[in-house]
Amino acid sequence: MKYPTAESPDGKKYEERILTLRRVSKKTTGGNYISFSTLVAIGDGQGNVGIGIGRGLEVPPSIQKATTQAKKHMLNIPIFNDTIPHEVRVKFKSSILLLKPAPQGTGLKVGGVVRVILDLAGVNNASGKIIGTRNKITNAYAVMEALKMLKPRVAYKTKDAKAEPKKAEVAVTAETPVVKAEKTAKEAKPAKKEVTTEKKAVKKVAKKK
């Protein structure tokens, strides 16, 4: 199924998904005041994701308002090997959320709005659990609070990176013969001076004779 895309002012295209759509009715003196409330999540699949709520007298204006609000509150999360860098647990109002990283090929073992938001963010492997409430709005904001707590993870050094210091050592040893050659050249200069002094002494003796 293809979802609609929303284009931002800077030219980036975000995938847009509706998390929940509610019809709100309010009693007034003249009758019922009916409006629509929409929760929308957008993301580009490369670590950028955002959510927003929009209200309007009709459904399309509420979706547009929610998308605009989501663009203003975009969040960039770190991704490590198509999963989250580390485990995180957060409590937001009545919602308790637990997210854990998962190895390649696991998929998203989470449900509800958590699955949609992680998919839009570009996280392909993760596991988690929601405890406390089934309110989609509360759970969506709990997910965003959990994603804010993520810290980037540094990749381990490869064999090539370990081999680099050896190259540096070889380079240092290659410079040592040059230093020795310079020292030998400096040592050879005083020897020439001694020879010249001996010649001058012979000349002086010859003049005296």
Image (tube, rainbow, N blue to C red):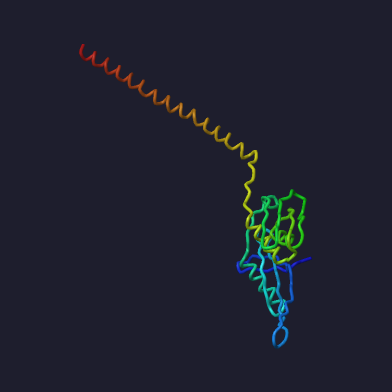
Residue 144 in the image: above or below residue 59: above
Looking at the image, residue 6 sits to the left or right of residue 173; the answer is right
- Which residue is the extreme one toward the bottom? 30
Q: Residue at x 77, y 55 (%)?
A: 109
Q: Residue at x 67, y 58 (%)?
A: 91
Residue 209 in the image: above or below residue 196: above
Which image quadrant: the C terminus? top left
- Which residue is the extreme one toward the right? 1
Q: Position of residue 27 (x, y in %)?
A: 71, 82
Res 92 quadrant in image:
bottom right
Looking at the image, residue 127 sits to the left or right of residue 52; the answer is right
Q: Position of residue 81 (x, y in %)?
A: 69, 50
Residue 105 in the image: above or below residue 24: above
Res 1 quadrant in image:
bottom right
- Which residue is the extreme one toward the left? 208
Res 59 quadrant in image:
bottom right
Q: Position of residue 114 (x, y in %)?
A: 73, 60
Looking at the image, residue 141 sits to the left or right of residue 186; the answer is right
Q: Position of residue 23 (x, y in %)?
A: 74, 76
